[in-house]
Amino acid sequence: MKPKCLKSGDTIGVIAQSEPITDDCLEDIEKSVKLMKDLGLNVKFAKHVYNDRLGYGETAKNKAEDINEMFADKGVNAIFCAMGGYNCNSVFDYLDFDIIKNNPKIICGYSDPTSLINVINAKTGLVTFHGPNFKSLSSEETDYGYKEVVKRFIKKDITFGEYDEYKILNEGEAEGILVRW
């Protein structure tokens, strides 16, 4: 099941499935918001993204509530994980995979969120994306991640770049499902 691409006027939801958004990273988050607004996209933050009730974010139940609500929200067209961290796997028992399956949309993240995108893919069949977290759209040393998000999620271009950028180990073609376990 493939989610729809983004277009001008769409809304990106931001969740804090691991670490909360804190003052330390607020500048990068605000820069990422500006990048998305410059593309004509809106940004909506989940209810608990700034909460740090446990010293590593909100409770697992509240984090999962945010994820479920973002998938259920018909006004949200894609979901980005705010950033990495740890303990994302604690939300799994509280996820509503029926809501997720019935409301397919882009979900993107890396590092700790890898477990979240993998479980969503495994339980629902939704194509998920191991790519930039919301914070990293503007905080990396290069703009490669941001450009790839635009290329794939807006321009619908799934090519991997120029062939001279890659070292080919074995010529040929392959087909399969790419999942990191």
Image: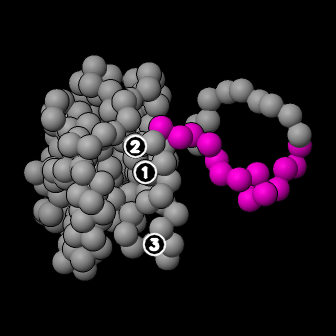
Instruction: Indicate the position of residue 43 as horizontal and vertical percent values.
Output: 19, 52
Outermost residue toward the left?
47
Vertical comparison of 117 with 131: above or below? above
In the rendered image, the quadrant that contains the C terminus is: top right
Is residue 160 shown in magenta? Answer: yes
Residue 102 percent location from the top left of the image: 28, 20
Q: CA distance from mark 1 to mark 3?
A: 16 Å
In this view, the residue farthest toward the bottom is: 24
* Residue at horizontal 57 percent and vertical 40 percent from the top: 158
Q: Marks 2 and 1, how far apart in space? A: 5 Å
Colour setting: one colour
Q: Quadrant of residue 103?
A: top left
Question: Which labelled disc corresponds to residue 154?
Answer: 2
Distance, label 2 to label 3, CA atoms, is 20 Å
Residue 115 or residue 136, whichever sits in front: 136
Q: Nearer the viewer, mark 1 or mark 3?
A: 1
Which residue is under mark 3? 140
Figure check: 114 above or below 30: above
Pick the front one: 152 or 132: 152
Q: Residue at x 24, y 49 (%)?
A: 41
Magenta residues? 156-170
Residues 9 and 31: in front is: 9
Judging by the rendered image, the residue that carries numbered circle 1 is 150
Q: Quadrant of the image for the N terminus? A: top left
At mark 3, the secondary structure is: loop
